[in-house]
Amino acid sequence: MKIALALAAAVLGMPAPAAAAAATTTYYVAPTGSDSNAGTLDAPFATIQKAVATVTAGGTIALRGGTYKLDSTVTIAKSGTASAPITLTAYLAERPIIEAEALPYTPGAVGSTIPAAQRGAIHMEASYWKISGLEIVHGPYAIYCNNCNNNTFERLSTHDNYETGFQLQGTSANNLIVNLDSYNNRDPRKNGESADGLGIKEGSGTGNVVRGARLWNNIDDGFDAWSFTSPITIQGSITYGNGYNRWSIPNFSGDGNGFKLGGSSGTGPAANHAVGNSMSFGNAAHGFTDNGNTGTITISRSTAYQNTKTGFDVDGGSTSKLTANLAVGNATAVALGSSTASGNSWNIGGTWTLLSTDPATITGARNTDGSIRTSNFLVPANGSAVGAKI
């Protein structure tokens, strides 16, 4: 019938009938559901994996509130399309919590290696997904995304995991990570040397953007771009309290940088990351560091406050450009090396007082749209357009 219609249209000079639209079906999942159900609102599935296996391009998986106790990794290996992404989201304003304590490697033995397929409560190797509104705890990583492209991750909370809260790696491009909270992640398996709030590392791919992230109290770094060779853009994000051994892990080896902007063993790859309007405070090491990245990092209108080491540490081989940044109360304001700086607080000189040093608003509850609540935290009292304003 379709062939006949197309031939008739061609003869008459009319456009052929459009192809069938991508699926727009919504499948529902609830802790009280059953995988033998139809996946409807009244008869939801019980497991996220069942919904992932069932959904097709353009479809949605809606998780009802409650705790989903995993007994195996949620594996996402199918992709949506540019015009029909797949959505995995909380249902309305309900709060789904993915609890992964029962998975292997939670934690792994000291010195062990997590098999690739078991990395993450959610292990993803797919493109064109939108994942939002989920809380993921106690996993061997919360989200581990390898070779992932054109995805959006929004309003996620990844905390108290046994590796990095959110890790993106491999050949991964054009991913947006927005309004992520990732905290209290640690890795006894590697003595605290690996678990960050957010890692975009060990890979390549342009167009990856981080916006509105808060990364705090992780055992290693807040943000880590270790050995990622393509530019990453970071905007309006906050790191604090990283690199402290709150778990009394023996032979502790956490680094404690707020934003680690590259590096690898020996001479780091040249990746021209860009950071704007971001804050790093109270970390155990540097606020912002090139960490051996030999590229040209740009850091603008950002603030380093009361970090144990250097506020802006860009003497590791980069030719970074620092503009209109604020450094207050760090052990050292800046280590410049071959980098350049203009219009920063240390260039201007003088004493810098702040409108507020109380982080309660900026670290408290987010706005209903997921954005960070606005405050005068760490804003210069003299009104200068220097440092971050979030």
Image: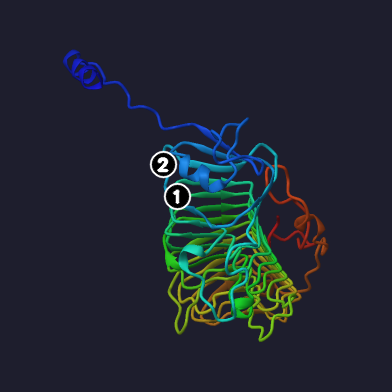
The answer to which quarter of the image holds residue 304 is bottom right
Instruction: Tell me how far mark 2 sits from mark 1, CA to CA.
Output: 8 Å
Picture residue at 41% right of the left edge, 32% below the top = 22
Mark 2 — residue? 82
- Classify the position of the N terminus by image quarter: top left
Picture residue at 78% right of the left edge, 56% below the top = 376
Along the line of sight, the residue nearer the viewer: 278 or 43: 43
* Amino acid type indicated by mark 2: Ala
Q: Is residue 231 left or right of residue 250?
A: left
Return the residue found at the far bottom.
251
Along the line of sight, the residue nearer the viewer: 34 or 28: 34
Q: Locate residue 385, reporting x and y percent.
A: 69, 59
The answer to which quarter of the image holds residue 8 is top left
Question: Could you say whether the residue bearing mark 1 is in a helix, strand or loop?
Answer: loop
> How many numbered marks appear?
2
* Amino acid type indicated by mark 1: Asn
Question: Could you say whether the residue bearing mark 2 is in a helix, strand or loop?
Answer: loop
Along the line of sight, the residue nearer the viewer: 268 or 171: 171
Along the line of sight, the residue nearer the viewer: 135 or 366: 135
The numbered mark, 2 or 1, whose residue comes first in the sequence reads 2
User: Do the residues under discs 2 and 1 have CB atoms within 8 angstroms?
Assistant: yes
Other-residue count near label 1 (Cα within 10 Å), few / some / many at <14 / 14–19 / ≥20? many
Mark 1 — residue? 150
